[in-house]
Amino acid sequence: MTNQPRNESATDDRENIRTDGGNVNSPFDVVSQYEETRRERYRKLYDAYVHAPIAIIRRDPRAQIGFTILTVYVLMGTVGTILIEPTEVTEGPAFVKPFQNWEFPLGTDRMGRDLFSQVVHSTQTMLQMVASGALFTVSVGTVIGGLAGYKGGKVDTVLSSITDTCINIPAFPLVMVLALMLPIGGNPWVIGILLCIASWGGLARAIRSQVLTLRQESFVEAARAMGISTPKIVFKEIIPHLMPYVVINLTNAGRRVIFEAAALYYQGSFRSRT
């Protein structure tokens, strides 16, 4: 009689053992009887990142206009540099007016250089600066703001102090000083990051405030109860809800790079020193 309860408990333990060796003791630990194939995962990615944006562009005229403008600039900075040769001094007469000579559609400058060729080849450099600067701003601001808002405590205090310091530093004078001190030369990728070296603070502060309101939601509490790690909770559960806000800041960061780059090139801060 003493062995029967032990045998029954041993049988129950064997029934609760999963195929991977763990025990099903948590209500959140549910094993699905259907396994997602690789094709189904690719199909979900296609629907989320290809089909859905194309459907939005087809329905919204504003999206069509914006997509057309962006496509023109991207093609100009990629394919255009292959089709159009770089211009040279005295390639044509000086000060040719726009749209009067099809050899020089936008005219020429005082040194006889083709303005259309200059626009095409400068677009490639500008796109590289915009890409590096905007991605740097969004990446740093999202990571620091997300971790500070979710973790709280000492982590929030340290990251918020760093963010406040970057916000209070005058960004444009800092970029001018660093551009003159560092051996940057004409690398557009480095220039784009330099232009946004202190621009991520505002985004980090805004992301932190949004994460503070989302970390008490039920889906975050459920993920925390399941033992999911902090990076996965922050970047797979919380940040996707903030992607529209992040995309808007990505656009604003790219525009800021264009304005600051034009100002600093006008001042000669990015001229290669020989």
Image (cartoon, grey):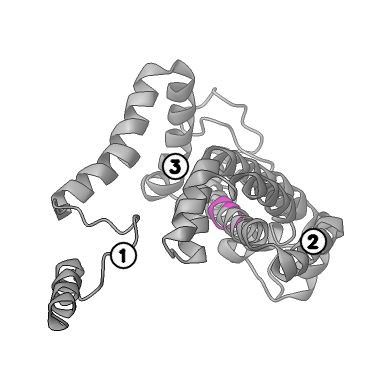
- Picture quarter containing residue 31? bottom left
> Could you tell me which secondary element the residue under label 1 belongs to?
loop
> Could you tell me which secondary element the residue under label 3 belongs to?
helix
Q: Position of residue 246 (x, y in %)?
A: 57, 44
- Looking at the rendered image, the disc whose residue lies closer to the viewer, 3 or 1, is 1
Measure the alpha-carbon separation of dots 3 and 1.
54 Å
Residue 111, can we see it?
no
Write down the residue under mark 2: 166
Q: Is residue 163 above or below residue 123?
A: below
Q: Residue at the location (14% across, 52% down)?
A: 33
The amino acid on which the numbered mark 3 sits, given as a three-letter code, is Val
Measure the alpha-carbon separation of dots 1 and 2.
47 Å
The amino acid on which the numbered mark 2 sits, given as a three-letter code, is Cys
Query: Magenta residues?
Result: 130-134
Residue 39, can we see it?
yes
Mark 3 touches mark 2? (CB < 8 Å): no
Q: Nearer the viewer, residue 45 or 53?
A: 45
Write down the residue under mark 3: 74
